[in-house]
Image (cartoon, coloured by chain):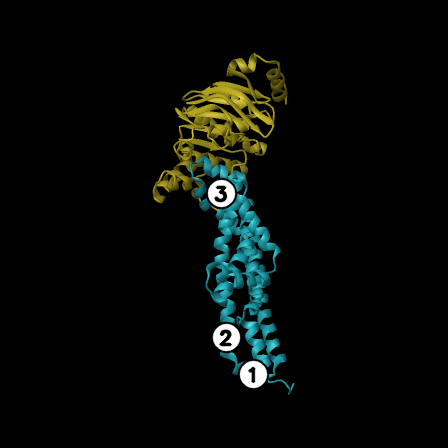
Chain colours: A yellow, B cyan
Amino acid sequence: MIVLEDVHKSYGKLKILRGCSASVKLGEVVVVCGPSGSGKSTLIKCVNGLVPFEQGSITVDGVSVSDKKTDLPMLRARIGMVFQNFELYPHMTALENVSLAQIHVLKRSRAEADARSEKLLARVGLGGKLASRPSQLSGGQQQRVSIARALAMDPKAMLFDEPTSALDPEMINEVLEVMQALALEGMTMMVVTHEMGFAQRVADRVLFMDGGEILEDTPKAQFFTDPATERAKQFLTKVLTH
Amino acid sequence: MSDFDWGVIVRSWSFLAEGMALSALLVAVATIGGLVIGFGLALMRLSSNRLIASPAAAYVTVMRSLPLVLVLFWFYFLVPLAIGRPIGSLASALIAFVMFEAAFYCEIIRAGINNVRQGQTEAGLATGLRRSQVMRHIVMPQALKAMTPLVLNQIIIVFQDTSLVYVVALHDFLTTASIVAARDGRPTEMYTLVAVVYLIICLSSTKALELYRKGRAG
């Protein structure tokens, strides 16, 4: 579904990604973890072309992201993305947030789009918040709206960029539960997160990144019990002991 | 007080109204034209292509460092030279105001757009919206909110600046009043009237602006 081959990215002289290769198969849940500044967020933003990269290739559902002939907006419409800071549109209600791209990208009528949005908002537990502005919602609620916004495009895969990092601890679970339900339904997911509990419960594989490289690409069970690299071992002791 | 003759205002009313109409026309054209061209300039300045961004930046810098009177003269004398025929005071003044205001509106609009977080654009793009759609549905509505008080403020400044058109022989409100003042020998009455009218218009606009800001904050 998602194939990355030898992806390089630098900002000026600063190398962020040094040859990352990985793949996410249909229906798979892959968690990307690693210390801050390891390039996880940059990597996941390369997948839908939000961050351009200099070298290597990424294909999603067989379509190349970096090919100049690719209709990038059409490709992005089929990949949902959830951001660390939610990035809901503050001048719109929850319903309008979820309907916007359905109307302007998928060309659904407003009624059609709103009906779909209502269903999705109900599904993430926010059926009663259709008319609320983002500023009237808690962080956890906002992030659930943003998951609904991504799902509204009927995506073939979902990208999550640290979806719980900006949340207060008591709101993390309500977001993780929605994500877990998605995973169980068979959604293809690539998730950058520090939530190792989530990784242990739903991930098929774990990618461990450090210094712009993917150091490990291992099945979940093996990653948590017997990581191959010393750096992954150190990372795990740090995140699992507290 | 017996020396004052306020009747002069009533007698010259229609002439004064013509001056006021010209001032209003200048404000309207300068604001609308300035916003349209200023928006174009702002988009150019925000371009990542330097060949597009630099000319707009240079234009804004030049215009903002010149006094408006100079720009008025410039278009009055240079435009006829450039196109080979006279275009008249009014047309040259309107062009000068639009081009001058465009530079200021460019900066206001650019600041408004920059004020919207980059993540908003990313979120829009990630759902498959095109750049122009992101600008229209997500960035501009938020930028407009931040810009509105600055635009209203700029309109008040333009209104005060319209009095400068006397240098190209146009009769705005202040100029018509000073003609009447000289003709009827009533400078005190006429200049008091001008001051009061400017004061009322600017104070009430400023007040409206304050109320708007409060309404937004509350």
**Identity of the amino acid at label 1?**
Val
Q: Residue at x 51, y 38 (%)?
A: A142
Tell which subunit mark 2 falls on.
B
**In the picture, residue A182 is in which quadrant?**
top left
Q: Position of residue A99 (x, y in %)?
A: 41, 41
Q: Position of residue B35 (x, y in %)?
A: 50, 55
Q: CA distance from mark 1 to mark 2?
A: 14 Å
Q: Position of residue B43 (x, y in %)?
A: 50, 46
Q: Residue at x 49, y 33 (%)?
A: A50
Q: CA distance from mark 2 to mark 3?
A: 47 Å
Whether residue A45 is situated above or below residue B139 in the rendered picture: above
Q: CA distance from mark 1 to mark 3?
A: 57 Å
**Identity of the amino acid at label 2?**
Ala
Q: Secondary structure at mark 1?
A: helix
Tell which subunit mark 3 falls on.
A
Label drawn at residue A89: 3
Name the mark nearer the viewer: 2 or 3. 2
